[in-house]
Amino acid sequence: MRFVLANPGLDNRIPSYKDLERTEEEAGDRPKWDNKAQYILTCVGFCIGIGNVWRFPYLCQSHGGGAFIILYLILLVLEGMPLLLLEFAIGQRLRKGSVGVWRSINPYLTGIGIGSMLVSLLIGLYYNTLIAWIMWYLFNSFQNPLPWSQCPLNDNGTGFVPECQRSSTMDYYFYRVTLNSSTSIAESGGIHWPIVVCLLAAWTVICICYIRGISTSGKAVYVTAILPYIVLTIFLIRGLTLKGALSGIIYLFTPDINELTKPTTWLDAGAQVFYAFSLAWGGLISFSSYNPIHNNCMQDAMILTAITGFTSIFSAVVTYTVIGFRATENYDSCISDNILTLLNAFDLPEDSITTSNYEAAFHHLNSSNPDIVFGLGIKPCDMQKLLSEGVEGTGLAFIVFTEAIMEMPGSPAWSVLFFVMLFCLGISTLFGNIEGVVVPLKDLKMLPKKWPQEAITGVTCFIAFIISLLFAQHSGIYWVTLFDNFAGSVPLLTIGFFEMIAVVYIYGIDRFNEDVKFMIGYKPSIFWQVSWRFTSPLVVLVILVFYLVTQSQEELTYLVWDPKSDQFPSLASVPYPSWINLIIFILAGIPSLTVPAYALCRLVFVYFKKTNN
Amino acid sequence: MLFSSERISKDASDGYKVRLSIKTALGDQAYLWDEKEMFLFRSTMAYAMRGQLNQQFDVSNIIVCEETARVSFWFVVTSPLNTSNLVDKKSVEEAVRKHRNRINSAFLLTDETLEFEGIPRTLEAPFTPDTPPWLIVFGVVMGAVVAGIIVFIGFSVVQKKRKKNKKTPEDEDSEEEESRGKTMENGAANEGVYNMSFTDEERFTRI
């Protein structure tokens, strides 16, 4: 399709090839990467985030294991890689941050950049709250025994606090001690000060790492991007030596071809690829704009795709060795408990029932005395159920993993390692995030020109800290989930789609091809041409439409921690209050609608200026 | 036994059921439960009752019945003053709770492996250190970060002062030097002459 919309004045707004060559020779005042490794590590750190550890393994296991991995890798190449190269190339060519790039292509498209900035801001707010929770757990890991291994006693010292007794020590520690969660999003319950303290720590750390822009964050990524891999390897070695690790891995990889026939599998895979690459946040465009003009961005895109695919599978394997271990431990203790109950009820000698003859003994006793056995209330021990428990999101990190770590010898060390890894994963993503907020703010001239970079970073971090106190309330976790579901889904897909349309049909795919040829020396092959024009926009559009359709059909519910509910200790599912629709519109609607809204406003503004002249 | 086993039944109001899990507790080191161990149990209970009620309890005052292979049995305590009377459950419970540790150690067992059915375990409070450890780590991290911020800001202030002093003697080269020196900052505003990517609001494109 050689269809291109009319775009007069484009050459006046963008640097020509001669200008670019000239800038290359002169020492400009735009920041530059110290070396290629810094750039690659920053991009890797940006793309590889906490989602790789706690979202991808869950998707993998719940959508048919090996089959899902193949689907994911295919979509990584078909959908993710072309979009990645698009963002890299456009940033490198136009040498601007996200707002500047879209404004250069056409001033009416500035809305895309503003949308990216809003999305980055909203995501950054709740993402840093997750990092604050991780820091809390990290700070509390320097003690033996770990604080989440014990329940506090009740008032008269005869038993444990009932909330802890009925659920588990990890649940209690997370929902009560760390968050002090209320029972609904409407009950704010005041500010929980440990979280405020950790939010302060998180925002100051990000502030100092980004205080001089990429010249400081570029050095920080040497640690934050490489350390997670080292820790993952250590955990892999530790995990493989644990009992039950293999059952976890088998559970993860067991392919279920039937899953490929379900549309939700494709949807989840496509969406995960999109979020995995942190596309449409604006950070990648910004980072690429600091590259030398003849940097081989196509090679970078392919390298990054390969690294992302490898890391996703690697971290899934590590995660599931630990999950397999925990499930096996729980299964063994479930069987032991049942054996003890039977021994006590029938007064049998201690080693008459062991784990090996448990089944036979149970059947024998059940057939001879069914009433007594029934009255004991023995729970069946289901390994599959244990393997599928709570293995996504915060549940994975703060409940399942902490439980598994407690059962490893030397648990404080493992706990520190694990949370340091999560911290590094999170903060390296946040570098890209804050780049996607600060650079557009400067491009839009919303901050005084005279301010040095330090002041801009400091003010942005401070204001973000104040806003993120919203998540320090007792209902904070419900707000985080809300932001995660709505600010980080629809707007990204919409903005990504607009980005593709803008580059292919408004900037012009031919001109784009020429640019890539100028930068790397050869024109992109037919694979890229087809992907940019058809495959990637189609995939993104389909995901967006399906997502909107499924969301609008479901009633909006969320999970709450309510000791008084019937399903306790499982989270209870309650509907959102009606005013949440307004919040959802602010989170998802406003960033998505900035693109048409800005174009419309500018049209009106221009029209009025014309009539006045 | 002075009392017939009919008086001691599962509904006895003054007796307690005891359950031992020796193999669970000691594994290979487990000892066999025989009448010597039972004698030890009775004498330990007598010791506990002496400590509780200050009366001369003897081994004969502890009556045991319904032993099983699980190793579980019932026992009741008779009063030394009048052997036809049983000591009430409350006193027995208090005696056991007070001396639980000594009773456990006599058998190398714990609260879970030497169970007195109906007497709750004495739970020890979780260990809470005086200064929460997390505060210490937090203090270290925040101290390092704040020190770093001060260093950075101080460094850039010193650098700016130096540039200012350099600028006044050299008027011609000063502009170029400043623009080169500003590589450290994200100066999107200082794009230079040749870059026309920024559209002023006054200059709008023709559509």
Image (tube, rainbow, N blue to C red):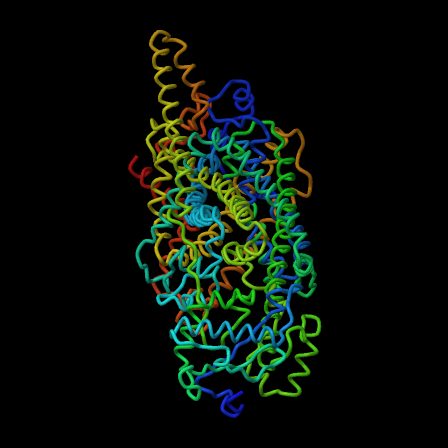
Quadrant where the C terminus of chain B is found in the figure: top left
Instruction: Please tell me whether residue A371 is drawn above or below residue A299 in the rendered image.
Output: below
**In the displayed image of the protein, which residue is found farthest to the left?**
A612
Pick whichever, A338 or A209, lies toward us.
A338
> Measuring 53% from the left and 66% from the top, which residue is drawn there?
B106
Pick whichever, A138 or A472, lies toward us.
A138
* Direction from residue A517 to residue A198 in the image, left or right: left
Instruction: Please tell me whether residue B126 is drawn above or below residue B118 in the rendered image.
Output: above
Q: Where is residue A405 in the image (x, y as percent from the top left)?
A: 56, 54
> Measuring 32% from the left and 62% from the top, which residue is drawn there?
A187
Residue B126 quadrant: bottom left
Pick whichever, A410 or B94, lies toward us.
B94
**Residue A596 showing in the rendered view:** no
Q: Where is residue A446 in the image (x, y as percent from the top left)?
A: 34, 36
**Residue A46 showing in the rendered view:** yes
Quadrant where the N terminus of chain B is found in the figure: bottom right
The total of numbered circles placed on residues is 0
* Direction from residue A515 to residue A559 in the image, left or right: left
Instruction: Please tell me whether residue B66 is drawn above or below residue A292 in the rendered image.
Output: below
Residue A152 quadrant: bottom left
Q: Where is residue A356 in the image (x, y as percent from the top left)?
A: 70, 71
